[in-house]
Amino acid sequence: MSKKRAVVSLGHDALGHTTGAQRDAVQVTARALADLVEEDYQLTITHSNGPQVSMIHKAMTELRRVYTDYTPAPMCVCSAMSQGYVGYDIQNALRSELLGRGISKPVSTILTQVTVDPYDEAFYEPTKVIGRFMSKEDAEAETKKGNYVKEYPEKGYRRVVAAPQPIDIVEIEAIRALVAADQVVIACGGGGIPVIEQQHILKGASAVIEKDAIAGKLAADLDCDELIIFTGVDCVYRDFGTNGQTPVPAMAVAEAKEMISQGQFEAGTMLPKIEAAVSYLEKVRTGKVLITSLGRAKDAVHGKAGTVITA
């Protein structure tokens, strides 16, 4: 029997929000991922990086404030740092968990770049808030550099960056090679390092990419059997957050689109996950999307929890 090829997308709950919390969280995450390996899944893993990239951005900005000889780290560099840092913790925890179960399987992280369109409308209306709170003077200095800031009354200002749509995964052939060798691959962390291609030269973009958007694209590019999205709830709900919320155990793409048009999904939480599911299933018609919480992973792959979306 051939293995089920799946892209697994890990949310904030799978990683924690600080270095210590992440170290503890990945131990739990590794057990859930190892359960999938034992269920005969061939895994390619991607993950969020919101708290991590924000922490790195803050640290590098403060370093510049203390040591003026240092140059501030651009967002693309912060994204690369977060990929390495998060990937390191996941691959070590998963490798140890697999070996503890008698499974000898390489686990590796690929530093992954993703091209974006410099004319993407997101660059004109940035929405992703990152970094520390700044004074009015610091905010004005950021604005003069061409960056966007957002004011928080009585707190200060924070940097805002664009979230453009992904175009191509630059290292996709390397990812395919490792997948073909039946290795566990961690790739496109935090949505990937956003780059703009200019005459075969890749230049970092001041942006972040939605990790759900890249998860859907990665699953489609690899022609995976499944896209598994772990999030903070056990399944998708209709009328979520109301007294009448009801679980949706299964839906087709048409129903998913209808629920999107009804405004059923909150932007920034469930909406990008549903959009990623639709994008993947429109390219891989025989595929399946599973949305559930990390704690219900094993039940969900046996049809006992979560939401299944099909074409």
Image (tube, rainbow, N blue to C red):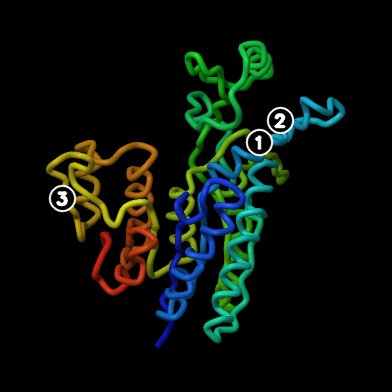
Question: Whole-percent x and y of residue 229?
Answer: 39, 58
Q: Earlier in the sequence, mark 3 or mark 2?
A: 2
Q: Quadrant for the N terminus, please.
A: bottom left
Spatial distance from mark 3 to mark 2, Cα to Cα?
45 Å
Q: Amino acid at mark 2?
A: Thr
Q: Secondary structure at mark 1?
A: helix
Density class for disc 2 (Cα within 10 Å; few <14, some 14-19, many ≥20) is some
- Taking the spot 60% from the left edge, 52% from the top edge, the residue there is 20
Is residue 311 visible in the rendered image? The answer is no
Identify the residue under disc 3. 246
Amino acid type of the residue that numbered disc 1 sits on in the rendered structure = His
Q: Secondary structure at mark 3?
A: strand
Question: Compared to 51, does 94 lie above or below?
Answer: below
Q: Are marks 2 and 1 in contact (CB under 8 Å)?
A: yes
Q: Is residue 91 above or below residue 162?
A: below
In this view, the residue farthest toward the left is 244
Query: What crowding class fits label 3: few (fewer than 14 Cα within 10 Å), some (14-19), or many (20 or more)?
Result: some
Picture coordinates of residue 25, whole percent (x, y): 51, 58
Q: Which label belongs to residue 117?
A: none
Q: What amino acid is labelled 3 in the image? A: Thr
Q: Secondary structure at mark 2?
A: helix
Q: Position of residue 207 (x, y in %)?
A: 58, 35
Q: Do tag 3 and tag 1 residues touch (Cβ < 8 Å)?
A: no
Q: Residue at x 22, y 49 (%)?
A: 237
Q: Which residue is mark 2?
A: 61
**Residue underneath mark 1:** 57
What's the distance in space between the residues labelled 3 and 1, CA to CA?
39 Å
Q: Nearer the viewer, residue 261 or 131?
A: 131
| Observer able to see residue 301 | yes
Closer to the chain start, of discs 3 and 1, is 1
Tell me the crowding category of disc 1: few under 14, some 14 to 19, or many 20 or more residues within 10 angstroms, Cα based: many
In the depicted view, which residue is nearer to us: 165 or 7? 7
